Amino acid sequence: MTLAGATYGFVLASVLVMAAAATAVFWSRSDAAIDEALDAAVRTRTSAAGEIFARELHGDWVDLGYLAQAAGQADLDGIGALMDGMRGDGTRISWIGFAGVDGKVIAASDGLLAGADVSQRPWFRNGLRSGFAGDLHEAVLLAQKLRPEGGDPLRFIDLALPVRTPAGDVIGVVAMHIDAAWAEQMLAETGGMLGIDLYLISNDGTVVMSSGGGAPGTGELRLLSAARAGTETAGRETWPDGRQYFTTLVPNVAYADLPSFGWRLAGRIDATTFRPGLHTLLGSAALAVAVALAALAVLSVLFVRIFIYPVSVLSANADTLASGADIYPPENGSSREVAQLSGALARLQARRTARASRTAT
């Protein structure tokens, strides 16, 4: 093997070893880095989704507080008009009512359930004591009045507040029934905006609504157990569709002074979410490596040409001198060693020429 060949071989072997080591480190760390990024992303996005969802409901809670204050002034005509304005077209709030302490509805939006007895409804019993937020439930009294014939059962979320006079005496309860279909649509839009699937879970571990993708199955025991315990958790889960997701659980969906519904919010993000970005990064890295290899090849050729080639020339010159040829080596100062070798060969040739001249005389 020539010295130039040995140099090229050394450079190639070094590149292969470094490339293998870098690839091994990259692949071992890329999965860990992606897992860490997914874990942080699903935690942050699910927390944000829970706050967005609760903040929307808190707006209704603020409106209900204003209604309770107005109802305490005993202006029933004005209360009815105010309820109709708050209800709007009914797509978000299905019913708003004011019931006296005896459980009889005194005033309601569009007059629905006026005079009805709601004393056994959970929102009324709890609303007499303090602010109340009720979990998702099917309509009872309003089912026949609001549900189209043959339509799906209506489901509501309840908000209720006691009505107090300026003296502080409780004279009734004001309540809102928020349409669950609207809440589920908002949850779906929030999940789509944040790029995650969301599951609203009651305190007994039941999924009450989701943003899409289906409810968790029995294979998600850890997720459901955490929901029942009310603790925060995160990690990689295999869901019923056979795909892996990173999931997290926000133990309490709340905002400001909004009463607790007892909800937990589970969020999941596909474990392959960041893979396209990784492939783009790999493409960029491959291009950078190709450019670096091209530069290394050019530099290697220049190195051989400047520093190795003169040694090869001197080696051939030394072999020619050893054969008895009367030639002098070329002068080359590419490196100290080449200059020393060239000078040594020149001195040897000069001495041999001088000896030959003395012998001839």
Image: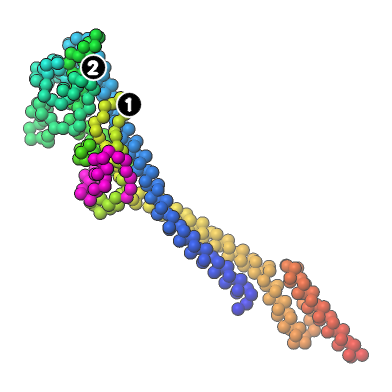
Image mark count: 2
Q: Is residue 29 left or right of residue 194?
A: right
Q: Is residue 26 left or right of residue 122?
A: right
Q: Secondary structure at mark 2?
A: helix
Quarter-of-image position of residue 354: bottom right
**Which of the numbered marks, if any, corresponds to residue 171?**
none
Residue at horizontal 68 percent and vertical 76 percent from the top: 312
Residue span colored magenta? 209-236
Can residue 50 be spotted in the picture? yes
The residue singled out by tag 2 in the image is 67
Residue at horizontal 89 percent and vertical 90 percent from the top: 359
Indicate yes or no whether the magenta region holds residue 222: yes
Quarter-of-image position of residue 358: bottom right
> In this rendering, is residue 164 above or below 219?
above
Q: Within 10 Å of the Cα at label 2, are there few (<14), some (14-19), or many (20+) other Cα atoms?
A: many
Q: Give how far across and how far down residue 217 sits, in percent.
A: 21, 48
Q: Secondary structure at mark 1?
A: loop
Q: Within 10 Å of the Cα at label 1, are there few (<14), some (14-19), or many (20+) other Cα atoms?
A: few
Q: Give how far across and how far down residue 329 sits, in percent.
A: 77, 77
Q: CA distance from mark 2 to mark 1?
A: 19 Å
Residue at horizontal 30 percent and vertical 52 percent from the top: 244
Q: Give how far across and how far down residue 334 sits, in percent.
A: 73, 67
The residue singled out by tag 1 in the image is 256
* Three-letter code for the amino acid on which mark 2 is drawn: Leu
Foreground mark, 2 or 1?
1
**Closer to us: 131 or 231:** 231
Q: Give how far across and how far down residue 132 sits, in percent.
A: 22, 25
Residue at horizontal 45 percent and vertical 53 percent from the top: 281
* Three-letter code for the amino acid on which mark 1 is drawn: Ala
